[in-house]
Amino acid sequence: MDTSAGLYLAIARGSFRRYSTYRVATVAGAFTNTVFGCVLAATFLALWRARPGLGGYDTAQAVTYIWVSQALLVAVAAWGGGFQDDLQARLRSGDIAVDLYRPVDFLGWWLAADLGRAAFQLLTRGVVPLAAGVLLFHARLPHAALTWPLFVLSALLAVTVSFGLRFLVSVTGFWLDDSEGLRSLMLVVSMFLSGMLLPIGLFPEGLRQAAQVLPWSALIQVPCDLFLEHRTGWSALTALGFQLLWAVLLFAAGRAAQSLATRKVVVQGG
C-alpha cells in the first residue's frame, strides 16, 4: 500500500516538475488569464450595476466569481487538455500498448499525472489572476478561515471530476480513429454547463435545474460558490458530497470503459 502511494506520489511530482519547465508559457498563460479576467470583470460590473443582486450575487461576489473562475480554469482543465494530449498521442502511435503492460494501474497512472499538473497550474495560473483581481477589482476574499480548506478540497474534487470526464472521452480513441471531434463537443458543453461563462444561477429555469445536477457544474460553479461563501454550513457539505458522488460515478464508468477498451488492443497480431 505504502509502495503504491509512493509510486503515485512520484508520478505526480514528476508531472509537476515537467510543467514547471515551461516557464515562458506559464507566464504568458497567467498574463492571458489576467487580461481576460479584467475584461470579464468590467463586463460583470456594468451588468450588476444595472441589475443589482442578479442570480443571488451582490456586485462584489459577481466580480470575485470571475477571478476565481479564471484561477480554476486551467487547473481543472475546463477546456480539456492535460493528460488527454499525451494519451491521445500514445493511442495514435501505438505506444498505448506499453502503458497497458506497465505494473501500475492504467487509470491511476494518468490521474496521478493530472493531479501533479493541476497542482502546478493552480499555484501559478491560479494565484496570479486571483491576486490581480484583489488588487485591481477588490475581489472579495473569504471571511471565514474554514472557507480556505473547503475551497482547496472542492478544487481537488473538481480536478478529479474533470479527469473522469476527460478520461471517458480519451478512451473512445480505442474505438474511434480520432476522438478530437468528441473532445471539441465536450469543450462546448463544458463552457456552458460548468459556469465558466456565466454563473449557472443566471440560466433560465429548467436549464438551470438541469445544469446544477450535471457533473460539469462541479468544475467551476461549486468551488466558486464555496469561495464566495455563497454556500455555507450544511449547504457547503452537500456541495462537496455532490462533487464526490460524481467523482466516484465517473471513476466507475472510466474503469468499465477501460476494461472494454483494452479488449480492442492488438499488438503485432497478438
Image (cartoon, rainbow, N blue to C red):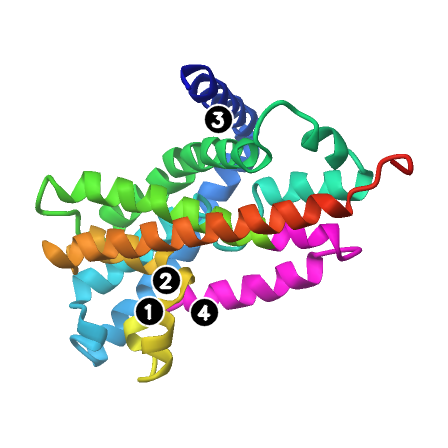
Based on the displayed image, in which of its 4 quarters is residue 132 positioned? top left
Q: Is residue 194 above or below residue 112?
A: below
Q: Read off the residue under disc 1.
A: 212
User: Please, what is the three-letter code of the amino acid marked with disc 2?
Assistant: Ser
Q: Are marks 4 and 2 in contact (CB under 8 Å)?
A: no
Could you tell whether 168 is left or right of 234 in the image?
right
Q: Read off the residue under disc 2.
A: 217
Q: Read off the residue under disc 4.
A: 192
Q: Can you give x and y, in whole percent of width and height, for residue 168 in the image? A: 58, 53
* Residue pictured at 28% horizontal, 73% vertical: 201
Q: Which mark is residue 181?
A: none
Sequence order check, earlier mark of 4 and 1: 4
* Residue pictured at 53% horizontal, 22% vertical: 14
Asked whether 177 falls inside the magenta stretch, the response is yes
Sequence order check, earlier mark of 3 and 2: 3
Q: What's drawn in magenta, residue-wise?
A: 169-198
Q: Is residue 51 above or below residue 123?
A: below
Based on the displayed image, in which of its 4 quarters is residue 153 positioned? top left
Sequence order check, earlier mark of 3 and 4: 3
Q: Can you give x and y, in whole percent of width and height, for residue 249 in the image? A: 43, 54
Q: Read off the residue under disc 3.
A: 12
Q: Disc 4 and disc 2: Cα gap in Å? A: 9 Å
Q: Residue furthest bottom?
A: 205
